[in-house]
Amino acid sequence: MIAKRLLKSALVAGAYHTGLLSLYLGRKLRGRAVALTYHRVLPKQELARSFSTDAIVVTPATFRRHMQTLRKSFNPLTAEQFSAALASGHWPARACIVTFDDGWLDNLEHALPILKECGVPAVLFIATDYVGTERCFWQETLARYLAAAATVPDRSAPLFTELGIPHVLKLPPAEARAATRAMIDSLKSQPQAQLDALLARVHSLLQQWQVELPQNHPDRFLSWAQVKQLSESGVVTIASHCCSHTPLTKLEAGAVREELQRSRRVIQERIGVDTQHMAYPNGDHDANIAAAVRDSGYRTAYTTIRGHVAPAANAFTLKRINIHERGTATPGAFLARLAGIF
């Protein structure tokens, strides 16, 4: 596996330096656009303390290289420009849009300065229930709880055994964190009520064991003042990622409409922006949900389905390409990712 990966990387590097990769990407994007999905921009020292999966993180240095490449070789569009081009059925050459999901504080601290430096616009989809709170998504929360539980292995061993990861208690911290995140990712399809119950039970156990949770961590969300600051930056458009970040496919139809409509209303009330763009939490959607998005007054909705955006694409099931540090840290690897090779 390692040898195969090294060979692939060498081939991509060769294709990049000879110009073949750029030619291939140009052909792939002929008449199409590319939407890039980012989540978090964290320096390595903060990433080491974060409980987010590394599949949603890039470092500032890598993000700067990405934005420099987009400014030099692509045509970055705002959310409104992207929507208008989609409606017209004609994309400018090498059209792209930079999107951020969730609403993490590091989007302001580390992403915004680079976006302004490179002159690249972006759209930030925020989960409104988390803005201005100390809450975090269930994945990061559970990972933090389990890291705390691992500090008392004599008491928590039965819990880790129940979760199918008893070996975590014997692993070095970095490996233990990766193994824990892999287990957490496997729970994504479970009903939200079941996930909430698990969180409550583990939190109760920590209280019984008198284990304090780490407070100094970088997994924090923006305040509304900071969201407004981003909105007024000249490069960031604020849009909806619904309210609770619960996958809409887990909700009844009425609750779906409430998430869609309330998030728009809250954004309007808080920062005076009437957003008409949204991204599905976790990317999960179906035809009925897409119709509800349209009926709620949105003009575009972004998925996590990987691919490029064709001229005749459905505006409510827009494809994107997720970007993370692993596999995009070099210019060649980044272009290969945009081309769909990685």
Image (tube, grey):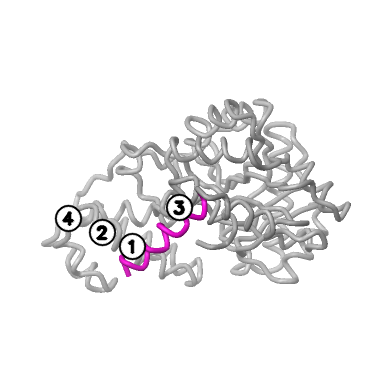
Task: Name which residue lies at 67% across and 47% down.
Answer: 240
Residue holding disc 3: 13
Amino acid carrying mark 2 in the image: Leu
Residue receiving disc 4: 172
Please report the bounds of the magenta region as a residue range: 1-16
**Could you tell me how far apart the alpha carbons at marks 2 and 3 are, in whole angstroms?**
50 Å
**Pair 2/3: label in front:** 3
Query: Of label 1 and label 4, which has the lower sequence position?
Result: 4
Of all residues shown, which one is farthest toward the left? 154
Q: Is residue 15 magenta?
A: yes
Q: Which residue is mark 2?
A: 205
Q: Are marks 2 and 3 in contact (CB under 8 Å)?
A: no
In space, the residues marked 1 and 4 are separated at their CA atoms by 25 Å
Q: Nearer the viewer, mark 1 or mark 3?
A: 3
* Earlier residue among tags 4 and 3: 3
Crowd tier of the residue under label 4, counting other residues whose Cα lies within 10 Å: few below 14, some 14–19, many 20 or above: few
Residue drawn at the location 41% of the way across and 39% of the way down: 42
Q: CA distance from mark 1 to mark 3?
A: 49 Å
User: Which amino acid does the dot numbered 3 rest on?
Assistant: Ala
Percent of width and height locating residue 229: 61, 26
In the rendered image, residue 57 lying in the magenta stretch gets the answer no
Query: Type of residue at label 4?
Result: Pro
Separation (CA) of disc 2 from disc 1: 6 Å
Q: Give the Cα separation between the discs numbered 4 and 2.
A: 23 Å
The residue beneath circle 1 is: 201
**Secondary structure state at the residue bearing disc 3:** helix
- Tell me if I can see residue 243 in this picture: no
Quarter of the picture holding the N terminus: bottom left
